[in-house]
Image (spheres, rainbow, N blue to C red):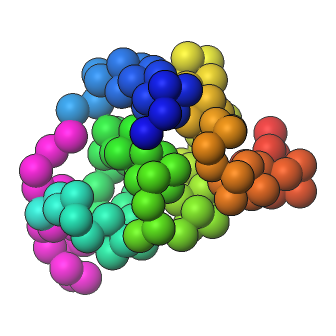
Amino acid sequence: MDDGLAAAVGRLRETFVRYPRRTVLEGCPHCRGSVLVDEHDLFSLTISLGGTVGTSDDVKSLVPLLLERLATGNELMPSMVLTLLVQQGWRTWPTAEQEATTAGHTHSCTPRIGQLMATDHPLHDP
């Protein structure tokens, strides 16, 4: 991880530190029940996060990890994570959280994320 990306991830962690990551997220009792947070299986967690699993604070607690993994790996689909942010109304979050999230997305080491940040992506909708 280069210095610029490390700084963006550090800013995300500092900004979202007030949302502690829980080891177990409450899920829909009819669909699946409680879910263990497993950083190694972020793909399946991200599919359910904010819907049938977890709360908006749980989503915020995972934003630094999700964006870091988008920038450094290929286990997550960028459009899925970005859509999750839109569904969570990230443009209504406090300014510091919005700015940290944007910095995490637009880092020069993440061209595939940058492409999704084009003005026609719903992440830009007010």
Residue 34 in magenta stretch: yes
Residue 38 left/right relative to 80: left
Residue 105 or 18: which is nearer the viewer?
105
Residue 104 in magenta stretch: no
Q: Position of residue 69 (x, y in %)?
A: 41, 53
Q: Position of residue 46 (x, y in %)?
A: 39, 65
* Residue shown at the point (44%, 29%) measured from the top left: 6
Residue 22 drawn above or below residue 48:
above
The image quarter containing residue 19 is: top left
Q: Position of residue 43 (x, y in %)?
A: 37, 71
The quadrant of the rendering that contains the N terminus is top left
* Residue shown at the point (53%, 59%) measured from the top left: 81
Q: Magenta segment, principal secondary structure?
A: loop
Q: Position of residue 15 (x, y in %)?
A: 42, 20
* Residue shown at the point (33%, 75%) measured from the top left: 44
Residue 5 drawn above or below residue 46:
above
Give the magenta range. 21-35
Residue 26 or 84: which is nearer the viewer?
84
* Residue shown at the point (43%, 45%) measured from the top left: 68
Residue projecting furthest to the front: 2
Residue 100 left/right relative to 65: right
The image quarter containing residue 30 is: bottom left
